[in-house]
Image (cartoon, helix red, strand yellow):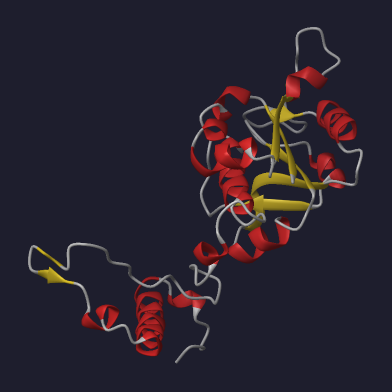
Amino acid sequence: MKIDVLTLFPNMYDNFLTESIIKRAIDRNLVEINIHNIRDYTVYSNNQVDDYPFGGGGGMVLMCDPIFRAVEALNNDDAFVIMMTPSGKVYKQSIAYDLSKHKHIIILCGHYEGFDERIKSIVDLELSIGDYVLTGGELPSMVVMDSVIRLTQDVISKESLESESFDNNLLDYPNYTKPYEYRGMKVPDVLLSGHHENIKKYRHSEQIRLTKENRPDLLGGSHE
């Protein structure tokens, strides 16, 4: 998988690319991530990429030309173009699975008052990571990349991907490790029983319980 990110603040990605699973995926050539400064694609000598909005209002708006130039320069293989914006479709695990099937993704990171509306004409998907506003699209783009890259083949073990939160519209079940008892709190006996069917049933019932308590919106009347 290849991912190109267009941003005004490329240094924000330094640690993201050099730590943990993302770094290992890059080192193993399972994913290629390129961070591009939008200012490198402007025709203005002062590196301008934004201007005041027509009709008035506060803030600045990212101009069409630098974004169009950048996407056209990078998109030589029918890449899937994503715009990170608060007005986009709310990101979910199902979308992460869909994106993990693409060979090349281009992510546009907004800033200031966002993008000139005409930029959407070259975008395949507008995404938001939640109902709140951040200072820019950089952090959301990292969220998307992290969730997608871990689903890419051979990045992490198949076993680790099984029974994850949201895969069946349920949150993940509780996990425990040593010691058996800590400050009066014990590991449920069923997990020590060695009875795999009972363990499976227990974990599923715990998924339903936790989802009802914390995210009942995910149930939609199922999993009674």
On screen, 201 above or below 170? below
Image point 83% across, 12% down: which residue? 44
Q: Is residue 92 left or right of residue 126?
A: left
Q: Quadrant of residue 154?
A: bottom right
Is residue 153 visible in the rendered image? The answer is yes
Give the residue at the far front of this rendering.
194
Question: 15 or 218: which is nearer to us?
Answer: 15
Image point 75% across, 33% down: which residue? 55
Give the residue at the far bottom of this rendering.
224
List x then y, in percent, for residue 7: 68, 29
Question: 93 or 131: which is nearer to us?
Answer: 93
On screen, 179 above or below 195? above
Q: Is residue 142 left or right of residue 174?
A: right
Question: 54 or 92: which is nearer to us?
Answer: 92
Is residue 49 visible in the rendered image? The answer is no
Q: Is residue 83 left or right of residue 154?
A: right
Image point 67% across, 52% down: which residue? 127
Q: Quadrant of residue 116?
A: top right
List x then y, in percent, for residue 148: 63, 53
Q: How many marks?
A: 0
List x then y, in percent, for residue 95: 67, 61
On screen, 1 above or below 116? below
Give the residue at the far top of this rendering.
45
Q: Quadrant of residue 167?
A: bottom right
Image point 65% across, 45% down: which residue? 85
On screen, 193 above or below 83? below
> Which image quarter is the C terminus in?
bottom left
List x then y, in percent, for residue 61: 71, 30
